[in-house]
Amino acid sequence: MALAQVRDVAKLAGVSPATVSNALNHPERVSASTRQRIQEAIDELGYVRNDAARQLRAGSNRAVGMILLDVGNPFFAEVARGAENQLTTSHRPLLLSNSNQDAEREAAQLGLFEEQRLAGVLVTPVGNVLHRLRRLKERGTAVVIVDRKTGADEFSSVSVDDKLGGRLAVDHLLERGRQHIAMVGGPQNLRQIKHRLQGAQQRVQQSDSATLTFHETPTTDVAAGRLATLDILAKPRSTRPDAIFAANDLIALGVLQELVRAGVSVPDDIALIGYDNIQFSASATTPITSIRQPAEEMGSRAAELLCDVIDKPGAPVQHTVFQPEIVVRESTTGA
């Protein structure tokens, strides 16, 4: 069945297509009785206006695109929620996309957003996309970096001090008397992981006796945590760590699953700390201590910065850096 067009609405309502257009876009120019006839025709025909086509003809689009690093991670879902809530107050729809930590996929998504001439883009970069972001900016699309600060001072950004987060995690483990710490996470080309590792290493280097080993994973999901833990437990018991710092809470959940499966007591034998403080970390079999990032606030602030750039071309670049904090639970303290 063919979709109803403006001319079909006009014919049924007994008016010109220009009058229908005015009723939709400038209702104050059309009398109430005529608007009523047009609305009745729209309802009868099931007409839906093609707003995307209208905006493209005008050379603009109010929508905002957001590329999430991992849609399966509840942390990024909370970031998106914060962004959407903020954008709703500005009457800007949000289009979500998932790079899945894949640079090629990310580049393709940025290309699609460029073709759609979106008003703005929120992105957590995976690959080297600086040149593409510059091109978006040159073509009038606002860009804000989320969950990391770009080295080039060209785009506003919202991030967390992940080096501090790494130090907080190790500080807490050292305070609990742990000396041999294994950090599990990766890949290191993700700047967030790299910075958490650097922060952890810096704190260990300040200690006289503590050690830190890094077990790099190819992904940041539960399965990666489980596989890394199997490798750790395969080593002689005498060389096992007495604490594990997981680079995010999904990895921490995988670590916990394998430790429990192997009969390893948490935290008596091995203490465990995660990162992100997602809801599942508190409801795990052994509630997991975690480094909290204010995910929803990050998304809201990123959207706020983006709207500033959209509404005020030439607005100064701004960087918001949130401070992480530790949420202590049983996986490091016991019952």
Image (cartoon, helix red, strand yellow):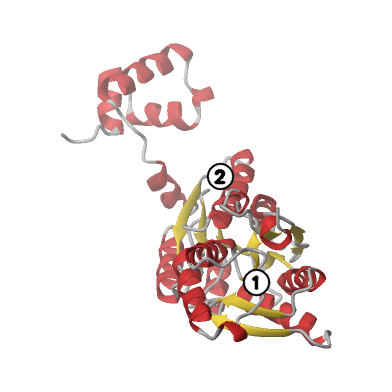
Q: Local crowd at mark 1 within 10 Å, few (<14), some, or many (≥20)?
A: many
Residue 135, image x, y percentages:
53, 73
Q: Is residue 141 visible?
A: no
Residue 207 shows up from this direction: yes
Above or below residue 191? Residue 136 is above
Horizontal arrangement in the rendering, residue 237 relative to residue 314 (left or right): left
The numbered mark at residue 192 is none
Residue 313 position within the rendered picture, expressed as x and y whole percent measured from the top left: 68, 59
Above or below, 145 relative to 180: above
In which quarter of the view is residue 206 placed? bottom right
Residue 1 or 108: which is nearer the viewer?
Answer: 108
- Asked where in the image residue 248 lies, by quadrant, the reply is bottom right
Residue that carries the numbered disc 1 in the rendered image: 245
| Residue kind at label 1, given as amino acid type | Phe
Query: Residue 114's spot in the image, x, y percent?
Result: 46, 64
Front-lying residue, 289 or 145 = 289
Residue at 44 percent across and 73 percent down: it is: 102
Question: Is residue 84 rendered to the left or right of residue 262?
Answer: right
Q: Which residue: 43% across, 58% down?
A: 116
Residue 92: assigned label: 2
